[in-house]
């Protein structure tokens, strides 16, 4: 008898087809996250769940669902701040994720945001589309030069290093970074690890935030850190929205204390404050970090690798850190 698997969101067809070969699949057609009531019911009805961003598997959900039938949550995505992995472990549930598959696509979006914010590309496109563009002139939409400047990375994991490589080898940028643990070899010639986030913000011309989400990193970049940025500085967030104090960032952008920001994530997404949406010096994308067909398919296949290994009695390839040891 095949294990019962709930797939909480619409996934690429190849992923669904493979899942159906090994599991009794219920594929939820919605593009919206599960409600808490749906999450509780899912834990009581399925052997496995393939959840993703926004599905509320926090401690309260596990308590309300007890006793659970589910034995594994194979998360679709590298970030799993919507899952309380410690509470899952207490409930006897293994949690996995999909690192690696998302690295290059997310790093590409970081550079997209950096370049768009620096060169005021969003403003330029809106100007052309409005029909108000009057033609080229020497001081039109003057932005910030990127090549040869200093790139700061907050969080030198897989994605942070991929961004650093693009900046250094593609644009000749010097790299400084903050990471909680020492990095002995970043793979970037001349890259320097600094002692604090503030020190990176102060030295870099462009700062990319690439840490994980979750309570431990909420408002990791706040008003004090933003205040240390250069007036011509650009701040890019590709991690999770709550990592940056959104209200403090809006104030800094409105007051032109920093040049611009590029955001792919928001503190209360999909809600984006009107004040932020009105800012010409903010480039805003709808969480496109991993949004390529190839990457989303690879993420789904990696999640299935975890599921198939688990039900075959093998070690799962990609357990979250809370499941290790």
Image: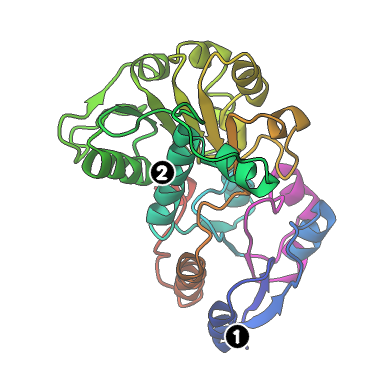
Residue located farthest toward the left when viewing the structure as drawn? 189
Residue 112: x and y in percent read: 45, 46
Stretch of the chain drawn in magenta: 43-70
**For the residue labelled by badge 2, is the local secondary structure a helix, a strand or a loop?**
helix
Residue at point 48%, 32% (across, down): 137
Depth check: 316 or 202 in front? 202
**Residue neighbourhood size for the residue with mark 2, other residues' Cα within 10 Å, grouped as few (<14), some (14–19), many (≥20):** some
Height in image: 185 above or below 5? above
Which SS class for mark 1? helix
Q: Locate residue 169 relative to residue 244 in the image: left or right.
A: left
Which quadrant of the view contains residue 222? top right
Q: Is residue 210 visible?
A: no
Q: Is residue 110 above or below residue 232?
A: below
Q: Position of residue 221 (x, y in %)?
A: 52, 22
Left or right side of 252 for 236: left
Tell me if residue 58 is in the magenta stretch: yes
Q: Which residue is mark 2?
A: 111
* Marks 1/2: CA–CA distance: 37 Å
User: Label 1 belongs to which residue?
Assistant: 20
Q: Quadrant of the N terminus?
A: bottom right
- Residue 90 position, x and y percent, is 61, 48
Q: Is residue 112 visible to the viewer in this orientation of the structure?
A: yes
Residue 213 picture quarter: top right
Specify whether 113 is left or right of 245: left
Q: Can you say whether 169 is above or below 149 in the image? A: below
């Amino acid at each position: 008898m095949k294990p019962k698997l709930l797939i909480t969101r619409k996934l690429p067809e190849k992923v669904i087809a493979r899942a159906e070969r090994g599991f009794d699949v219920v594929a939820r057609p919605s593009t919206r996250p599960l409600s808490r009531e749906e999450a509780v019911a899912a834990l009581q009805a399925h052997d496995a769940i393939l959840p993703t961003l926004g599905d509320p598997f926090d401690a309260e959900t596990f308590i309300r669902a007890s006793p659970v039938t589910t034995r594994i949550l194979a998360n679709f995505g590298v970030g799993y701040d919507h899952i309380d992995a410690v509470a899952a472990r207490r409930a006897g549930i293994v949690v996995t994720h999909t690192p690696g598959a998302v690295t290059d696509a997310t790093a590409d979006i970081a550079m997209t945001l950096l370049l768009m914010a620096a060169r005021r590309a969003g403003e330029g496109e809106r100007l052309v589309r409005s029909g108000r563009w009057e033609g080229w002139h020497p001081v039109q939409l003057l932005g910030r030069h990127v090549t040869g400047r200093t790139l700061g990375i907050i969080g030198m994991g897989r994605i942070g290093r991929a961004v650093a490589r693009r900046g250094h080898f593609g644009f000749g940028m010097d790299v400084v970074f903050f990471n909680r643990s020492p990095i002995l070899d970043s793979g970037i010639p001349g890259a320097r690890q600094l002692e604090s986030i503030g020190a990176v913000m102060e030295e870099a011309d462009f700062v990319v935030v690439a840490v994980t989400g979750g309570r431990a990193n909420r408002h990791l970049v706040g008003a004090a850190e933003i205040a240390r940025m250069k007036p011509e500085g650009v701040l890019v967030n590709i991690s999770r929205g709550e990592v940056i104090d959104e209200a403090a960032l809006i104030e800094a952008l409105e007051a032109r204390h920093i040049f611009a920001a590029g955001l792919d994530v928001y503190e209360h997404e999909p809600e984006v404050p009107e004040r932020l949406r009105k800012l010409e010096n903010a480039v805003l994308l709808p969480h496109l970090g991993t949004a390529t067909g190839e990457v989303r398919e690879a993420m789904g296949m990696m999640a299935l690798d975890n599921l198939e290994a688990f039900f075959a009695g093998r070690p799962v390839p990609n357990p979250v850190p809370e499941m290790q040891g």
